[in-house]
Amino acid sequence: MTEIGLIAWREFLQYLRARGYLLTLLLVPLWIVVSALLHRMATSDEPLRPFAVVDDAGGFIAAIDRGLAREQARADLEALRSWSEANVDPTGLGAAAPALALLLRRDPGDSGAAEAFLAAGGVDGVMPVLQAHRRAGAAAFARPAFHLLRVGAPADIVAAARAHDAAAMLPVLRGARRVPVPGGAVSLFAIIVIPAGFSLDAPRLEYWSENQTDPILRNFLQRALLGELRGRAAASAGLDPGMARKLLQQGLDIAPFNPANLAARGAVTEADDLRIFFPYVVALLLLLSILSIASMLLIAVIEEKSSRIVEMILASVSPNRLMAGKLLGAAGATVVMIIGWALGGGGTASAFAAIPPASALGILLRAHVFADLPLILLCFLCGLAIYTMIFLGLGAMARTFHEAQSFLGPLMFLLFAPIGFLVIVHNQPNGWLATLLSFSPLHAPFFLMIRLARHPPPVETALAFLFMLLSTATIARLMARGFARNILRTEGSASPWVGLAARLRRLAGVAES
Amino acid sequence: MTPILEVEDLGKSYGGFEAVRHLSFALARGEVLGFLGPNGAGKTSTLRMILGILKPDRGSVRLFGQAWSRALLPRIGYLPEERGLYRRMKAAEAIAYFARLRGLDRAAARRSASALLERLGLAEAAGKRIESLSKGMAQKVQLAAAIAHGPELLILDEPFTGLDPLNQQAIEGLIRERAAAGCAVLFSTHTMQHAERLCRRILILRRGEKAFDGSIEESRRLLPRRVRLEASEDLSFIAGLAGVSRLEPPGPGRPAWEALLAGSTEPGAVLAACLARGIMPYRFDAAGPSLHEVFVAIAGSDAAAEADAA
């Protein structure tokens, strides 16, 4: 093994044995597991919100029931869309049932999507078609739970609501008294009183509940009853009710097409989103790697320097080789960390999302994320090299941990400063700010990788990559020089200004003599 | 025979301070050279320039008969003045790591580490982490790390600092062994007894310049011979004897009469003069000057304070 290899291997093992490294390695999968568990608990344990409606205006209960059916259809469509992305063969489905394939690509929140899904028979209607194109080993579809339930109100509760008798309503709203429903009994989450004369001119209704902060039922009523009121107003103005509903509810179905998607004849799918999203994940991994590895590297250099081990090493290895070995060791530890995160995090994410690993890989392949991978990797390696070299240089310059920490603040500021521009760069990936940041020596690796899937101008891209490589080489050269000059310095000032002042004094002395 | 190390007109400055000036010397195979000098005399800078850790401002270093090159460094072993090893490494692992850095393959490095630990009485510490070893044990491990690859030139910067007499003796034995096997040894020290015991030749640096380079006997001859006498009678008559350049009476810190002899005057002449006067001294010491005295005299006022403190 060469000197560089030996140093790299020792550094690599040192990272792997460090408690901080192991903690960081476990952190991401742990964070995914905890997040997934919390999310699952929050969604599966989301309480059912049974509510009763006292309709003194007449006819609004039917409108509420229609709205509930629409909401259920929207939730079903959303779940079905995610499930089919991972478990259904899109080519087969597109050939056999193009309308359904198109429906599954629509945003469930789009106006008309839920109606079209209901018209296709909902889950029961489309599932036989989807089952025919289900991939081998695909997970079964689990219908999402729905959390709104309208129940009939007992007569005394209706009377109490009309009379504003809060004391009479409180037991049923607090769970002390339960209301019978098919298959059991429930306590009420809310009682809705729609007064006589409820209309667009008098759109006031009463919402009795002990929980006035949960927006789910409130938002639903807003959508369902406002639509009904508008429909009625249109009808009273002589419009056909169907036409009135269409006029009031129909939104635009803006079908996205990107001319760059030549193979798909311009069609934009979720795979395109994934291709855009993937570099953000890599950029985040780069940031996490820098934060964890580079700071450990800094501490290791200061320790070697203060314990004078470095002098033993430099007696047989050049500073450049020592630095290269440290760089390779840190890179190796980063690769292991990312593989660990990918396996641990991807595995747990896949398990919680009920997507088999092969399907998850298939999703990434269909999204063509790997087409950009070589350049993304180049950005990653340059970013890692730049910051690792800077930390090595700082470690050599600093005489104590305390002094190193004082360097960390400005460096972290420089690293994080452009995060505020991320939204602008995301929305205008080829705007002037994105271009500017792609030519920032410390930030080019991050911004270049996230722009790759957004088809930046080829000449600009080539120049930016060239600039990034040159910046990396220049920073490496500067830091290597600083490392070699300062690594043995433990006393006196490491500041270059002191050296400059000494030179000036000597020059002045020569001039005087 | 081609010298193992040749230093020619070496110079190094830090800012406006000249740490090493026009230094030249050579070291032969199997020779042990004591590199002496007070603090700040330029010893460590010289050693670092020989190893290429520092770049000389002027002059040259030749190793093994060739112009200095990094490729020759694996043939050198180096123990720096301020010492440290990776705290979490095991003793055998640390020795083998540095041996491998200097060109030994893994198996040979391990074998050499085990043999050295055994030789230094540290076989039981082979699997222990450096952080769990005593200071003396860790220092011996570091010396082992410097020599495990079988260097032809061994450079030791203050190898005895912080060691108890037993450990000092063990390390002296190891240095003698290496020298007997043909390894040239250049070691710096402040402790003259070590130099007296280990070297035939010393080099004394003063303010970056070579102040003396020769054998210990030659260095002793630089100072006038001295006779120490203790007797119950007054010995002030000695000052008037021919060949006595100076006489110091007993005083604080000096329990005996001390007579400095000029030229080739034999000490026996002083004793004979005493006997002729019927005076029988109960102490008569005609030993030459110690290396400590030589060092203080050569290194001058810079070293006086340091030597007194030691």
Image (tube, rainbow, N blue to C red):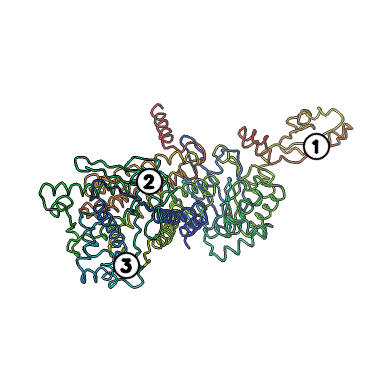
Residue A209 is drawn in which quadrant? top left
Looking at the image, residue A71 sits to the left or right of residue B260; the answer is: left
3D distance between C-alphas at marks 1 and 3: 114 Å
Image coordinates of residue A413 in percent, x first then y, are: 37, 41
In this figure, which residue is indicated by the disc labeled 3?
Answer: A87
What residue type is disc 1 on? Ala
Residue A425, image x, y percentages: 26, 47
Q: Which mark is residue B269?
A: 1
Which quadrant holds the C terminus of chain B?
Answer: top right
Upstream in sequence: badge 3 or badge 2 = 3
Q: Residue at x 77, y 36 (%)?
A: B227
Residues at marks 2 and 1, common chain?
no
Q: Quadrant of residue A98?
A: bottom left
State the image quarter where residue B43 is shown: top right
| Numbered label attached to residue B110 | none
Q: Secondary structure at mark 1?
A: helix
Callout 3: chain: A
Residue B197 visible in the shown view? yes
Which residue ends up furthest to the right in the rendered image? B278
Label ID, residue A478: 2
SS label for mark 3: helix
Q: Which marked residue is nearer to the observer: mark 3 or mark 2?
A: 3
Q: Give me the chain letter of mark 2.
A: A
